[in-house]
């Protein structure tokens, strides 16, 4: 019987070690890595970039005023950002309402920061919004603004994940 008790204790320790490793790997306070934060930021940036580029292209092509183009880009960035997260958690079995709640909790702060940074950069770069879709200034400015947004948002995501917030709420559905 003592061997059985030892085996249970070992199994319990193994389970605790595994749970503790899972917790750290998925955003636990003890070791949220920069790589994990960068991955979460890239995920968020993908949706933002799709919406941002589409909004800038549509707004510029249709001759919208700069403010209209920026608003369209922001709306589309949030829409695509949330949609990508919802797609993943829906595959994990969540219904539409639950998936939307997860997406809102996971992405709102990240997308908001990215949108503030990249749109501020696009507006601040002289001539970027008025440059037109066929110019290097437009595309270089847009690319640079998204890189800047990534660099500023990654530490924010790292802090949020380490507190079990932001993209940490999505990790439970990635199994």
Image: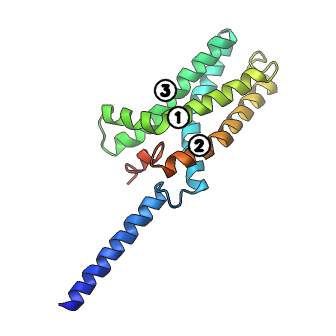
Q: Residue at x 41, y 45 (%)?
A: 169
Q: Is 55 drawn above or below residue 89 in the view shown?
A: above
Give the residue at mark 2.
156
Q: Nearer the viewer, mark 3 or mark 1?
A: 1
- Residue at coordinates 55% horizontally, 39% vertically from top-left? 44
Q: Residues within 10 Å of mark 3 (few under 14, many from 20)?
A: some
Tell me which numbered mark, 3 or 1, is placed earlier along the sequence.
3
Q: Which residue is mark 1?
A: 109
Residue 140 x/y as whole percent: 77, 31
Q: Is residue 106 above or below residue 133?
A: below
Label 1 close to label 2 by CB (< 8 Å): yes
Secondary structure of residue under mark 3: helix
How crowded is the residue under tag 1: few (<14 C-alpha within 10 Å), some, or many (20+)? Answer: some
| As drawn, 126 above or below 158 | above
Q: Does residue 47 show up? A: no
Residue 91 x/y as whole percent? 35, 43
Residue 132: in sight, yes or no? yes
Query: Residue at label 3?
Result: 79
Count all numbered tags in the image, as a single digit: 3
User: How far, Cα to Cα, is label 1 from label 2?
Assistant: 9 Å
For the residue pair 69 and 114, the one nearer the viewer reads as 114
- Please tell me in which quadrant of the rendered image residue 117 appears: top right
Asked if labels 1 and 3 touch by Cβ distance under 8 angstroms, the answer is no
């Amino acid at each position: 019987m003592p061997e059985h008790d030892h085996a249970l204790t070992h199994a319990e320790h193994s389970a605790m070690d595994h749970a503790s490793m899972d917790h750290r790997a998925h955003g636990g306070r003890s070791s949220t890595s920069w790589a994990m934060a960068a991955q979460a930021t890239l995920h968020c940036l993908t949706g933002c970039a799709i919406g941002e580029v589409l909004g800038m292209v549509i707004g510029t092509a249709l001759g919208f005023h700069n403010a209209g183009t920026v608003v369209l880009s922001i709306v589309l960035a949030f829409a695509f950002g949330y949609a990508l997260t919802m797609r993943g958690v829906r595959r994990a079995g969540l219904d539409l309402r639950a998936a939307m709640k997860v997406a809102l909790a996971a992405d709102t702060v990240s997308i908001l920061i990215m949108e503030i940074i990249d749109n501020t950069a696009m507006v601040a770069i002289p001539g970027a919004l008025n440059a037109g879709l066929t110019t290097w200034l437009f595309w270089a400015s847009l690319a640079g603004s998204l890189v800047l947004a990534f660099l500023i948002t990654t530490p924010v995501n790292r802090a949020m994940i380490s507190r079990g917030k932001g993209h940490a709420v999505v990790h439970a559905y990635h199994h």
